[in-house]
Image (spheres, rainbow, N blue to C red):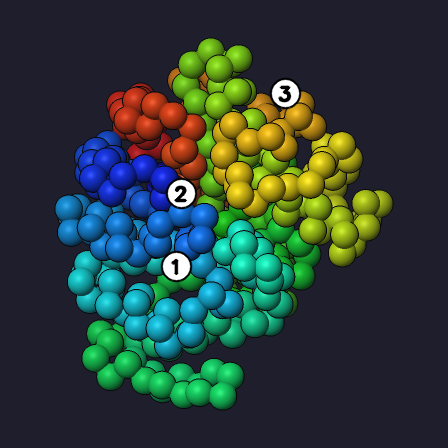
Amino acid sequence: MDFGITFKGDISPKRTVALCKQAEVAGFKYGWFFDSHVLWRDCYLTMAQCMAHTDAMIFGPLVTNPGVRDWSVAGSMYATLALQSGNRIEVGIGRGDSSRRMLGKKPMTVANMERFAEALRGFARGDEVAYDDASAQLTWANGYELPIWVAAYGPRALAGAGRSGDGLVIQLAEPGLVRWFSQQALAGGRAIGKDMSAYQIMSAAPVWIGDIHTAREQTRWFPAMVGNHVADIVERYGMDSPDIPASLTAYIEGRRGYDYKEHADKDADHLDFINEDIVDAFGILGNVDDHIAKLKELAAAGVTQFNIYLMCGEEERIVAEYGEKIIPMFT
């Protein structure tokens, strides 16, 4: 199992660079960044700084979407980062959540997301790419085969993730639900005859090593964020849909409106509907042995990368403890 960390862009670039240098030494392979340009600073400038101060760590947005940049601009950015870093760039994409909604716009369609994935690959290779009413070619690109991860929850998006992605991003750490999500993505790829033997599965969630009360308070924001996505699924498919596990929908019945200005904020005002069982299930909390046990369950469910949402406080300590006590158990 590989390990990654994710930033949301609210800590200083200098500290972010230091955390990435620490994480690389500790055995983390990936450094990811939320790409929501209104809520937080643009992630790509900091990403380039981190690339310049590390040797092997792979970086990328988690996630970007088709609707906030011209596709040739996005393609040029990733091709440039590939050249500058020695191909240490991968890209997570989705339909567009906070970055679209903060502009008063809805997420894009699954079909558009899939076309975006292919366009980004083409630009990174240096191919001529036609999109919308435009066409462009990055003749200076180095031929890199850009890996694309797709974040998805609903059945249609999961099938699209299997068809168009090299990996699936699942924002929770509940092994049973991870298996349920990933099986749908794998089935989507197999339905078009795609070889899924190398397909990657990422579980992304916050962690806390320490007493359970503090752990719950530091990570309660996360199920609320996930609940926002689940609410979109329920709106489309219905609360009683046989396609959605009851365990995924039961906890959002008391959900109030979600404030995107407090997106991924541990002190947000929209957290009171989240109970302790959900907090415990969706993240990884407790002592070191608890973390190792749950990570083994996730590995058995097919997870190939566990990605820590590193935004709960005491980030340096969490990176150090994972590097010293947990990652060695999986390498």
Mark 3 residue element: helix
Quadrant location of the N terminus?
top left
According to the picture, the residue beneath numbered tag 2 turns out to be 8
Read off the residue under disc 3.
Answer: 276
Is label 1 in contact with label 2 (beta carbons under 8 Å)? no
Q: How many labels does the image show?
A: 3
Comes first in the chain, label 3 or label 2? 2
What is the secondary structure assignment of the residue under circle 1? strand
Query: Label 1 is placed on what type of residue?
Result: Val
Q: In which quarter of the image is residue 138?
A: bottom left
Query: Which of the two residues, 153 or 76, is positioned nearer the viewer here?
Result: 76
Q: Label 3 neighbourhood size at 10 Å, few (<14), some (14-19), many (20+)?
A: few
Q: Is residue 298 visible?
A: no
Of pointers 1 and 3, the one earlier in the residue sequence: 1
Q: Of the residues shown, which amino acid type is indicated by label 2? A: Lys
Q: Which residue is drawn at 43% across and 37% down?
A: 309
Q: Point out residue 153 in the picture as x, y percentages from the top left corner.
A: 62, 51
User: Disc 1 or 2, which lies upstream in sequence?
Assistant: 2
* 1 vs 2, front mark: 2
What is the distance, in whole Å, between disc 1 and disc 2 at their CAs?
A: 15 Å
Tell me the number on the disc at residue 91.
1
Picture residue at 71% right of the left edge, 51% below the top: 233
Q: How far apart are marks 3 and 2 (CA)?
A: 24 Å
Q: Where is residue 239 in the image (x, y as percent from the top left)?
A: 81, 45
Q: What residue sits 62% from the left and 61% below the top?
A: 106
- Residue 249's tag is none
Return the residue found at the far right: 240
* Residue type (three-letter) at the residue carrying disc 3: Glu
- Element under label 2? loop
Q: Is residue 198 above or below residue 240?
A: below
